[in-house]
Image (cartoon, rainbow, N blue to C red):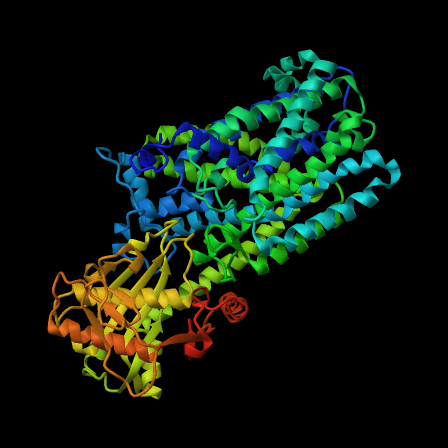
């Protein structure tokens, strides 16, 4: 089924087994930290209240059978061997699936997509000698024609994203609280809860307070901690099997699941919400990131390394741990006290304190993985226009995947503390976490069915079989979790509704604002009719007019020159946009074109980023931008009729230019050398200025030769660069137009405006210096 990824160049295909095994070992700390801590609370949540133990042990055997087959069918079969193959150029998660579908069916929610974006090397991989089936073609056509279906697909992806964010609140609270619950065995039984909550809160506060330092300094410890924890629980499990019930393996038979439900009936069905917790956590697909994300020496994980880690170590360790707990409980009827059903009661008494310490460390590692994943999903949502812009701090200058979002971090911490203090028990925390996780799984199943048909180009019957088989299992668990709405399951629903409302209002307002820009843009003919001076005074320097538009002239420019008839000698309409791919190669970063004749010195530059790319700071970005324009000038012939605006449908007139680091033979910016040359290449210097300025020059390759017009154009660009760069930004005030409905006024005038005022500006990621910024205020009536 791995058709798309089978035809792309995989950088790991030729790796040695030693390298693969090293990656498998390192993936344990990133991928499986939270999944490995589930034995701390599964049995305790399962037998909390819904079912009671009897002398026959049928409930124990049935619960173990459910745990075994759930772990086998969902994480192992579904995720490791099927869903893992649907990665988006190495990225995983619900947004990766949505991104794949956007590129294969043109259902993207991004308003400023262009046909030229489809030529990106990572955009779409054609499958040789294969074509969509008749049903696949009809499905694709239906999705592309109906905006309602496109919005439904976006909402489905956002529901998954919101539940992942909710899990970022619930999993740290559940894991840490369950880990510290071992304190109860060392203290008076009637007082243990008064200790658990403060200890858990202290650990959570410390965990979130240290997020801004990143994980690159301690990341190397994550894998050893998880390995030690898995060895610990598997060894204890094996000991309990041999000591208490060597025949516990018979409980793995699926017959015991039937007997379990038959005997317990409604109570057994409700208890499935506790069994569900055995598959909670960040699954392999959500962590397949091509990720320097955790370790300074990590590189990125391959599918094979993740599969090896789970099948050979994680899966057997978890099975042994659950079998050991079941073996102990089957011979020790301790169900009269809730706290005695927990994990620590099955641990030999002389090992409880060391196991407690290891469990706390493992819980911290697992929580760290979920928190980092939450930061990542917020960044993806923001890049795709579905979340207000937030401050993204890259905690490592070497590896781009390590990010920290201050606003989200403190919100998560407060919510984690509220859940811990408010619930104070694993039962309600487990109910909440289980519903969040199973909802994400259902969303993944739905999106995967479309991927099978549209991206893998397989039979619709295969997609239906996938949905029916896995959807039935997940629907059973979903119903068992949803029935516990009043017992904690309301928390992820409430959190997801809040985040969904924020995402919808922001996305709706952003689209309406873009539509206003599109309807009120100025024709390029108006600009060209002004003449070479544009009818205004042209002053020294480069003027970067930031706009969301990829064609036409933004209204803020005409608004500016109408009130202040002066502008810079080089004018660049700059659009920084995201495309539905995880990464855009540096060699494909810039799209550059000329607006009007050469003597106008007016250009359009579109800078494309993937949803996981890092935006450069202002100095590097400014240098790359000027170099890309210079390289465009060098490559282009003198064509005074050339247009690059989308109004003429001439998107292909835009030239793809890479960053200077990817084009060693292109134009480079260097400081002037004393002898006027560098490496034997001719240079173009700016004419002397009266003032002392930052001196720069272009080093131009000898071949191909450039004409005098291009040389003069490069000289003007260099003079403008020396004079300085000014960023002209639009400062918009969005209001609902007269006659709008009350709901629209509420969303736009209050909801969107509140989010806009409290979010980062569009150019914040570029770190534009305030001294070079000029804002043009405009009121948008949408």
Closest to the observer, 663 or 673: 673
Residue at position x 83%, y 27% from top?
A: 336
For this rendering, which residue is in front, 159 or 368?
368
Task: Please give left or right for residue 308 compared with residue 326 in the image.
Answer: left
Residue 523 visible in image: no
Q: Quadrant of the N terminus?
A: top left
The image quarter containing residue 478 is top right
Q: Is residue 710 above or below residue 99?
A: below
Q: Position of residue 287 (x, y in %)?
A: 49, 40
Question: Residue at image x 47%, y 42%?
Answer: 298
Q: How many marks?
A: 0
Q: Can residue 313 be seen in the rendering of this structure?
A: yes
Residue 139, percent across and down? 32, 41
Q: Quadrant of the C terminus?
A: bottom left
Image spot of residue 244 (x, y percent) = 74, 15
Relative to 673, say whether 310 is above or below.
Answer: above
Q: Is 429 on the left-hand or right-hand side of 254?
A: right
Report the front residue among 378 and 766: 766
Q: Is residue 140 above or below residue 693?
A: above
* Left or right of residue 722, residue 76 in this image: right
Q: Is residue 381 above or below residue 747?
A: above
Q: Quadrant of residue 641?
A: bottom left
């Amino acid at each position: 089924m791995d058709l798309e990824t089978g035809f792309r160049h995989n950088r790991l295909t030729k790796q040695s087994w030693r390298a693969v095994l090293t990656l498998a070992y390192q993936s344990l700390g990133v991928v499986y930290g939270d999944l490995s801590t589930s034995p701390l609370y599964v049995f305790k949540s399962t037998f909390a209240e819904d079912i009671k133990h009897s002398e026959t042990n049928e409930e124990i055997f049935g619960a173990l059978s459910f745990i075994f087959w759930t772990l086998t069918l969902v994480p192992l079969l579904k995720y490791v061997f099927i869903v893992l193959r649907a990665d988006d150029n190495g990225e995983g998660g619900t947004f990766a699936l949505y991104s794949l579908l956007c590129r294969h069916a043109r259902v993207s929610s991004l308003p400023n997509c262009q046909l030229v974006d489809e030529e990106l090397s990572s955009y779409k991989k054609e499958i040789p000698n294969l074509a969509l089936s008749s049903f696949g073609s009809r499905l694709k056509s239906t999705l592309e024609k109906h905006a309602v279906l496109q919005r439904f697909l976006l909402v489905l992806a956002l529901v998954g994203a919101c539940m992942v964010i909710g899990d970022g609140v619930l999993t740290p609270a559940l894991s840490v609280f369950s880990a510290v619950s071992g304190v109860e065995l060392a203290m008076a039984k009637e007082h243990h809860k008064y200790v658990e909550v403060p200890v858990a809160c202290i650990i959570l506060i410390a965990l979130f307070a240290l997020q801004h330092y990143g994980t690159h300094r301690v990341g190397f410890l994550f894998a050893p901690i998880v390995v030690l924890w898995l060895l610990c629980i598997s060894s204890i499990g094996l000991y309990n099997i041999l000591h208490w019930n060597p025949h516990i393996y018979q409980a793995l038979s699926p017959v015991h699941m039937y007997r379990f439900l038959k005997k317990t009936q409604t109570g057994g069905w409700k208890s499935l919400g506790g069994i569900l917790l055995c598959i909670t956590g960040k699954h392999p697909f959500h962590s397949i990131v091509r990720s320097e994300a955790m370790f300074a020496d990590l590189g990125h994980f391959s599918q094979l390394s993740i599969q090896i880690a789970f099948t050979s170590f994680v899966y057997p360790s978890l099975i042994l741990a659950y079998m050991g707990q079941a073996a102990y409980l089957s011979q020790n009827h301790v169900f009269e006290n809730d706290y005695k059903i927990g994990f620590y009661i099955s641990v030999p008494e002389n090992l409880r304190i060391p196991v407690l310490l290891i469990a706390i460390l493992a819980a911290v590692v697992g929580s760290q993985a979920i928190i980092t994943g939450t930061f990542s999903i917020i960044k993806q949502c923001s890049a795709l226009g579905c979340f207000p812009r937030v401050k993204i701090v890259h905690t490592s200058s070497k590896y781009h995947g390590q990010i920290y979002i201050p606003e989200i971090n403190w919100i998560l911490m407060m919510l984690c503390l509220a859940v811990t203090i408010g619930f104070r028990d694993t039962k309600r925390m487990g109910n909440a976490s289980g519903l969040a996780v199973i909802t994400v799984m259902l969303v993944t199943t739905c999106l995967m069915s479309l991927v099978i048909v549209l991206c893998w180009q397989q039979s619709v019957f295969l997609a239906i079989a996938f949905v029916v088989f896995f959807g039935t299992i997940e629907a059973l668990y979903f119903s068992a979790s949803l029935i516990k709405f009043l017992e904690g399951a309301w928390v992820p629903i409430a959190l997801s509704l809040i985040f969904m409302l924020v995402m919808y209002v922001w996305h709706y307002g952003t689209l309406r604002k873009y539509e206003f820009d599109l309807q009120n843009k100025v024709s390029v003919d108006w600009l060209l009719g002004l003449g070479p001076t544009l009818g205004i005074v042209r002053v020294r320097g480069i003027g970067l007019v930031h706009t969301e538009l990829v064609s036409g002239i933004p209204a803020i420019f005409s608004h500016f020159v109408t009130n202040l008839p002066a502008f810079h000698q080089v004018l660049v309409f700059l659009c920084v946009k995201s495309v539905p791919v995880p990464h855009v190669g540096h060699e494909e970063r810039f799209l550059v074109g000329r607006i009007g004749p050469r003597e106008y010195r007016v250009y359009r530059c579109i800078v494309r980023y993937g949803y996981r790319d890092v935006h450069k700071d202002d100095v590097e970005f400014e240098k790359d931008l000027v170099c890309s324009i210079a390289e465009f000038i060098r490559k282009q012939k003198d064509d005074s009729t050339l247009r690059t605006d989308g109004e003429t449908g001439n998107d292909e007139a835009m030239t793809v230019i890479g960053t200077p680091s990817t084009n060693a033979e292109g134009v480079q910016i260097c400081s002037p050398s004393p002898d006027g040359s560098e490496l034997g290449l001719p240079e173009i210097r700016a004419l002397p200025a009266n003032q002392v300025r930052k001196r720069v020059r272009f080093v131009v390759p000898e071949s191909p030769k450039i004409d005098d017009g291009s040389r003069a154009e490069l000289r003007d660009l260099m003079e403008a660069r020396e004079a300085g760069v000014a960023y002209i930004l639009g400062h918009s005030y969005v209001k609902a137009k007269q006659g709008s409905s009350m709901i629209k006024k509420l969303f736009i005038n209050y909801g969107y405006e509140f989010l806009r005022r409290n979010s980062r500006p569009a150019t914040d990621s570029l770190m534009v210096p305030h001294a070079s910024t000029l804002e043009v205020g405009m009121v948008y009536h949408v």
